[in-house]
Image (cartoon, grey):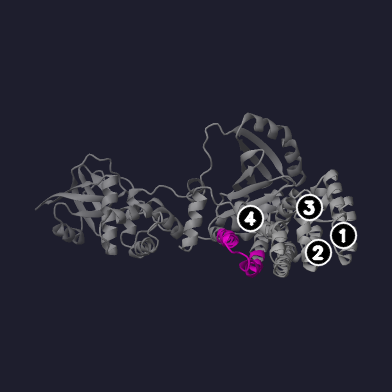
Amino acid sequence: MPVNLSSVFNQIRDSSSAKTSSNVSNGASGVSGALNGTAVTGDAEGMAVLRKLLAGDIFYGEVVGIDDKTALLKLSDGSLVNARLLSNANIQAGQALTFIVEETSQSGISIKPLDISQQQSVFISKALEAAGLAESSDNINMVKELLSLNMPVDAGTLGEMVKYSLNFPDANPSTLASLMRLDIPVTADNIAQFESYKSYEHSILSDLNKLGGGLSGIFEEIVFYGKEALLADSRTGEQNILNQAELFSRITDTLYSEGTNGQAVQSRTMAEVFDSGTLKEFAEAVRKLPVSDDNRAMLTKLSLSILEGTATVHEVLDSFTNILKSQPSAASELQNFPGTDFFNRLLSEMINETLKLNPADLTKEEGLKSYYKRIKNVLDKLSDDIASTDKTGDLSKSMDSIRSNIDFMNDLNKNMTYFQMPVRFSESDANGELYVFTNKRALAEGRDNISALLHLDMEHLGPVDVYVHLQGMNVSTNFCLESEQLLDFVYSNIDKLSRRLEALGYSTTFEMKVNDDGKHFDFVEDFINRDITPRITSQYILDIKA
């Protein structure tokens, strides 16, 4: 598949917008060192705090210094307090920790730091208390889910999470939290899309094929059921055939008129789709069709252009539709037309040409954006026409699924860069996905260091992962394949890819390996949550006041 990497990465940069999200701040102030040989003394404000504390109380403090078993702590209000340490824990100056009061006396208090699990438990309890929520298992798990994504757990965030949990009781809490973190609207459609992406059931290519099958069914209904309709009631049957033919004509006009950049879709010639023997057989069958004198000249001309291979798929479908519109009774003849698979192949090619991504589009600037804009325009224009014939609602479901998928992808691209690429080839389809790991800010700033993954699901090669690292004009590429045989195949053809990239001005290096551990790319862990780093316990302190 000839992909202009320069064009792809340029359109990624152009479409990026910097977005900064800062949910958590580090509580440590950078104070370091011990107060060896220096008196550890609190101030008046700190002493006032001490007198209010009881055994079992929890408080937060930054370790300013340590002398023997006494620690000088800075509280959140800036006051200083000194306390005896009862634990042999490894505490250092500069740490911000959660402490529990073990003993109180006239001379002061004795404290010990809580371990990580205790600190989180206390933090969760305080967060729920501040938000006015009960410490139920569901609410505790909700806070843990937010913390795992480094999200704030202030009253506002917890309130939103509770609201969405009530509105969508069957939704996975991690999905709700992820949508909130990504600033994607929490709707039933987006919840379904996120779950589909997690389980690898999100392919637009699959929905396009379903839609294509439904559209093909409209033409098949005219051809294969026309005779029965005519026998049942000739007048009503002819009117039904005429209506269906006019509907199919509007659909094909919409599909072929909505091309890239406002241009019509270029339909392939019959010679590019069928072999010469099939063309000869079909041309002869067309020439012998019993039609009216008005249609005879058109069929003769069509037969000749089919035989020569110069007629396009669009022209052939248009010709048959026009015959049915002017002579509905011809449907009974088409039912017994030799090689009914020929029509299925024609209709399949129409869907490939009009609804799927041409590999050549990937070499163009804005190629992917133009493709998705075109698909949405086509679906909008088809909606009214399809509604009149979509008795089971299957076509509408496919269209709604495609729209939701594209909308979700647009929302996702506000935070990161991701595209699906439902590519059509002459003999098969391939679903491609582009994941760009470099963050939006770096892309918007035009940095040269870009990392990405191109995932392909191909009929003969199976799943292929291509990891790409672009630094300036240097491209390093790592192929991950399913077997040694595929490794040998790619290796034997790698020179072709290398020459194409070098012709574009890139310096290339390639590595290849077999995916022998069976581990595949995970959409959530390896992409959505890729930049999330574990939060250290001391960072919980600032969030509790939010």
1 and 4 marks in contact (CB < 8 Å): no
List x then y, in percent, for residue 385. 65, 68
In terms of sequence position, does the residue under pointer 1 or pointer 4 come before the other? 4
At label 2, counting other C-alpha atoms closer than 10 Å, the crowd grade (few under 14, some 14-19, many 20 or more) is many
Picture disc at residue 299:
1
Question: Which residue, given by chain and number where applicable, does mark 3 sit on?
Answer: 337
Mark toward the start of the polypeptide (3 vs 4): 4
**SS of the residue under disc 2:** helix
* Quadrant location, the C terminus: bottom left
Earlier residue among tags 1 and 2: 1
- Marks 2 and 4, how far apart in space? 28 Å
**Marked residue nearer the N-terminal end (3 or 2):** 2
Q: Is there a contact, CB below 8 Å, between mark 1 and mark 2?
A: yes
Observer-side mark, 3 or 2, equals 3
Magenta stretch? 378-406
Q: Which residue is mark 4?
A: 208
Rounded to the nearest whole Å, what is the CA distance between mark 1 and mark 2? Answer: 9 Å
Q: Position of residue 494 (x, y in %)?
A: 72, 36
What separation in Å lies between label 1 and label 4 (alpha carbons)? Answer: 32 Å
User: What distance separates the C-alpha of mark 3 from that of mark 2?
Assistant: 14 Å
The amino acid marked with disc number 2 is Ile
Q: Are marks 3 and 4 in contact (CB under 8 Å)?
A: no
Q: Amino acid at mark 4?
A: Leu
**Amino acid on which disc 3 is placed:** Phe
- Left or right relative to 66: residue 516: right
Q: Amino acid at mark 1?
A: Leu
